[in-house]
Amino acid sequence: MVKRFREPIYVTRPVLPDIDSVNDAIGKVWVSKWLTNGGLQHKELEKQLQNYLNVDHISLFNNGTLALVLGIKALELTGEVITTPFTFPATVQALDWNHLNPVFCDINPKTLNIDADKIEALITDKTSAILGVHVFGNPCEVGKIQQIADKYNLKVIYDGAHAFGTKIKGKPIGSFGDMTMFSFHATKLFNTVEGGALTFHDEEIGEKLALLKNFGLVSSESVVLSGLNAKMNEVQAAIGLEVLKLVDQERVRRDKVRETYEKNLADIPGIRIITGLKNKSSSYQYFVIEIDASKYGRTRDWIHKELEKYNVYTRRYFYPLCSDFHWYKHLDSAQPENLPQAQKSVQQVLSLPYYGDLELESVEGICRILREMHTSAPFLIPIKD
Ligand SMILES: *Cc1c(COP(=O)(O)O)cnc(C)c1O
């Protein structure tokens, strides 16, 4: 019997620089008396991230959601956008704010990303774009998606909120499609407390984004379009510069956590590890398993609740499906029978605690609990939640 952990173990912990270095970084902002509107810290972070993510262009925002809202706006899309129901609400809400209609496409059972083979059947004369999400940092089938987009003259946007640092055969994730959004929220691998960015190829898009995130102002007295306020401020940028110094070290530490989980979970029936697919370089954002209750003997929901008794707090990302939000229920593409894989996966997926500070002994403990839950399961007896 594994004992309850003395301290709660949460699904993640933010990467936090040493407080003295944060004080020094914010001190520079104070001395400059320049708090926002593209100051020195903003310029420096933009430069370092462009370099780290290895992209042509990047534009910083005060959060990932507004980055996506304004990125979509900049592309001047119309009508329908094909996207995935298995994502964080922000992805689809960014379409709502642009008065675009989502068309939900089912997901690939292996990666849980939009199923590229199912996109073409959903294209109509109203379709203007495909919005994919690199769920849990596993990349979408970018080649297939681009082929479809080229054939039908569609734009391609990626929500890369989980994919900071992911590469596909050495190519940086932010270089695919017309545009990629990154989130720098506290829970993400790289954080600026709150923050986000768009990466893109077209320089003109950059000029448009600069206007969109600053009220459409070209100068202090000339407004050329209807924008928003979505700028990253100097304090966010200064903290981000400190966090960025720690990201590579965090990735190495998370790799040890991943390795420990994989070693200890490998032979438990009914558990499949979703993150860290072979031949893909990982973002180390999440460690996610899928539970097949018919082989494991317990449902995902039962495990999720039971682990709390041990002081272990997991997350059922992404439950519920976006297609189940009440304002999409009338859509043809939101009907459960059109999304069989998403409906199945949303019942099976569980994010386990994952951060560099997580002690390997604790990881082994969590795995031991998961093993015990399986061996003590009332196997094949109907399961009550
Ligand atoms: C975190 C997240 C967002 C939202 O980013 P914010 O920076 O919190 O606005 C969008 N999409 C996905 C998939 C996310 O995980």
Image: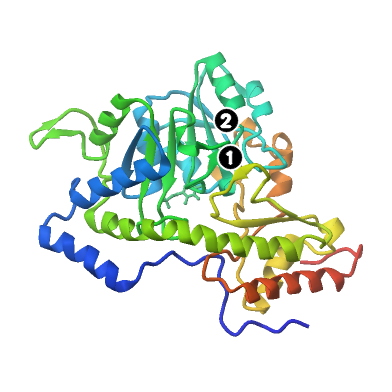
Residue 19 appears left or right of 333: left
Q: How is the image coloured?
A: rainbow
Which disc is residue 255 wearing?
Answer: none
Q: Amino acid at mark 2?
A: Val
Q: Callout 2: few (<14), some (14-19), or many (20+) C-alpha neighbours within 10 Å?
A: some
Q: Position of residue 220 (x, y in %)?
A: 9, 37
Which disc is residue 139 wearing?
Answer: 1
Q: Residue at x 58, y 36 (%)?
A: 169
> Which residue occupies the foreground of this view, 236 or 79?
236
Q: Residue at x 62, y 25 (%)?
A: 144
Q: Which residue is mark 2?
A: 142
Q: Callout 1: few (<14), some (14-19), or many (20+) C-alpha neighbours within 10 Å?
A: many
Label 2 with label 1: CB-CB less than 8 Å: yes
Q: Amino acid at mark 1?
A: Pro
Q: Residue at x 17, y 55 (%)?
A: 35
On-image quarter of the N terminus: bottom right
Q: Residue at x 53, y 60 (%)?
A: 252
Query: On the image, which quarter does residue 247 sit in?
Result: bottom left
Query: On the image, which quarter does residue 254 sit in?
Result: bottom right
Does 61 sit above or below residue 178?
below
> Which residue occupies the foreground of this view, 192 or 311?
192
Residue 276 appears left or right of 241: right
Q: Position of residue 261 (x, y in %)?
A: 68, 64
Q: Position of residue 42 (x, y in %)?
A: 24, 49
> Which residue occupies the foreground of this view, 261 or 372?
261
On-image quarter of the C terminus: bottom right
Would you say the beta carbon of the disc 2 residue lies within 8 angstroms of ligand 1? no
Secondary-structure class at tag 2 = helix
